[in-house]
Image: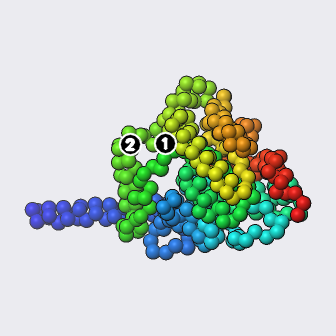
């Protein structure tokens, strides 16, 4: 009988080990199924952040000449197709020399502008070309999408200075979102340079990211997801004081727009854009995208939009606040998350921005007789 005990123990351990391995494999398969994927990339799990992004001295940029299919996009959960041109902008190739009769509108912005969670023809920037065409008969409209996921006003200025001005835009449209003044998180570099284990295991990659995120939150004293937990537990819709606390909890994201200190960064960036416009001879306009909670709250809480309008007026730029447009359709499901507009909302934005730009004095100048 005593000889059977070691064999029983080995059998139990063997079964436990097999069960554990089966569980790990099942978890790995489940995590891979949920992860965003770059379809064409080979050699293990794709490095999502570097599929079409690259790090430069001027901040994050799009990789030039990329043609990728993104499966299970983290925002829309859709499969989308992203193509960049040789200038590192989403969309078709464009020559440095501007043909006669062509009007170029360069759009600076973040993930809302690049819209990689949708196909190109669904994004408001591409739709803007068609919407502007009737306002410039006899001209060809080219909207240049210089949006990059996760950037802010400082990186947008660098893109305009280093790349955008070479394409001789007639008008530069700054698509401002409420977190564009907040500082970079500070751990993105660590997350996007992955070793062999992280490239080949969704479990290892997930554990690593969680550990890095928790370490960053501990160092910064900020609970990144605290505002998400508040979304369904506090009355931010009807109580202004609660909304203020809600925004404070999101201060490293959209709540940055309620932090007075961040507006110094915005004002400095706008000054730089003004100086570049004087050198490049292009007009500047602004449009401001809201966060979902401004759209759904009883009051608009539009302090950030009013500050953008004030800065725009100081610089002599026309500005369009998109918050009223979104609030007019508040009964619809307009967002994939807290800020990225769905297809129908993108279409409405394109139409509104086209009508806004067509009504500016600058448009009358650039769209005059050929």
Q: Nearer the viewer, residue 205 or 287?
A: 287
Please tell me whether residue 244 is drawn above or below residue 320 in the rendered image. Answer: above
Q: Which mark is residue 208?
A: none
Residue 141, picture quadrant: bottom right
In the visual, does 157 lie left or right of 44?
right
Please tell me whether residue 135 is drawn above or below residue 93 in the rendered image. Answer: above
Q: x%, y% of residue 41?
A: 52, 73
As measured in the structure, the alpha-carbon distance from the residue carrying label 1 to the one carrying label 2 is: 10 Å
Q: Which residue is drawn at 48% across and 47% down?
A: 183
Q: Is mark 1 on a helix, strand or loop?
A: loop
Q: Residue at x 54, y 44 (%)?
A: 265
Tag 1 residue: 252
Q: Nearer the viewer, residue 353 or 70?
A: 353
Q: x%, y% of residue 193?
A: 41, 64
Q: Choose the circle earlier in sequence order: 1 or 2.
A: 2
Q: x%, y% of residue 131?
A: 81, 55
Q: Which mark is residue 220?
A: 2
Q: Residue at x 49, y 42 (%)?
A: 252
Residue 343 seen in the figure? no
Disc 2 crowd, CA 10 A, few/some/many (<14, 14-19, 20+):
few
Q: Quadrant of the N terminus?
A: bottom left
Q: Which colour scheme is used?
A: rainbow
- Mark 1–mark 2 CB contact (< 8 Å): yes
Q: x%, y% of residue 94?
A: 71, 70
Residue 223, picture quadrant: top left
Q: Is mark 2 on a helix, strand or loop?
A: helix
Q: Residue at x 85, y 63 (%)?
A: 139
| Residue that sits furthest to the left in the current view | 2
Disc 1 crowd, CA 10 A, few/some/many (<14, 14-19, 20+):
many
């Amino acid at each position: 009988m005593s000889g059977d005990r070691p064999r029983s123990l080995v059998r139990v351990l063997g079964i436990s080990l097999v069960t554990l391995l089966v569980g790990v494999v099942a978890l790995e398969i489940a995590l891979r199924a949920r992860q965003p994927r770059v379809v064409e990339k080979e050699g293990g799990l794709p490095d999502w952040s570097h599929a079409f992004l690259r790090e430069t001295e001027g901040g994050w940029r799009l990789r030039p000449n990329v043609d990728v299919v993104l499966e299970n996009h983290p925002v829309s959960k859709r499969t989308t197709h992203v193509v960049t041109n040789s200038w590192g902008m989403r969309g078709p190739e464009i020559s440095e020399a501007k043909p006669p009769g062509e009007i170029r509108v360069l759009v600076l912005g973040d993930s809302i502008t690049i819209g990689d969670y949708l196909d190109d023809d669904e994004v408001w920037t591409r739709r803007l070309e068609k919407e502007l065409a009737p306002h410039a008969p006899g001209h060809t409209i080219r909207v240049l999408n210089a949006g990059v996921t996760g950037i802010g006003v400082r990186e947008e200025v660098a893109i305009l200075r280093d790349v955008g001005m070479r394409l001789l835009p007639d008008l530069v449209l700054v698509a401002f979102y409420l977190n564009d003044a907040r500082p970079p998180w500070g751990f993105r570099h660590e997350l996007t340079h992955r070793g062999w284990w992280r490239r080949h295991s969704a479990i290892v990659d997930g554990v690593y990211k969680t550990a890095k995120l928790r370490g960053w939150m501990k160092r910064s004293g900020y609970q990144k997801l605290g505002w998400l937990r508040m979304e369904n537990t506090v009355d931010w819709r009807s109580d202004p004081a609660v909304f203020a606390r809600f925004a404070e909890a999101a201060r490293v994201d959209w709540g940055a727009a309620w932090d007075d200190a961040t507006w110094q960064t915005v004002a400095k960036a706008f000054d730089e854009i003004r100086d570049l416009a004087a050198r490049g001879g292009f007009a500047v306009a602004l449009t401001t995208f809201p966060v979902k909670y401004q759209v759904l709250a009883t009051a608009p809480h539009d302090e950030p939009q009013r500050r953008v309008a004030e800065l725009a007026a100081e610089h002599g730029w026309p500005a369009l606040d998109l918050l009223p447009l979104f609030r007019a359709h508040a009964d619809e499901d307009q967002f994939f998350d807290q800020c990225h507009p769905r297809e129908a909302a993108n279409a409405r934005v394109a139409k509104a921005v086209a009508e806004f730009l067509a009504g500016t004095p600058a448009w009358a100048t650039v769209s005059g007789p050929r």
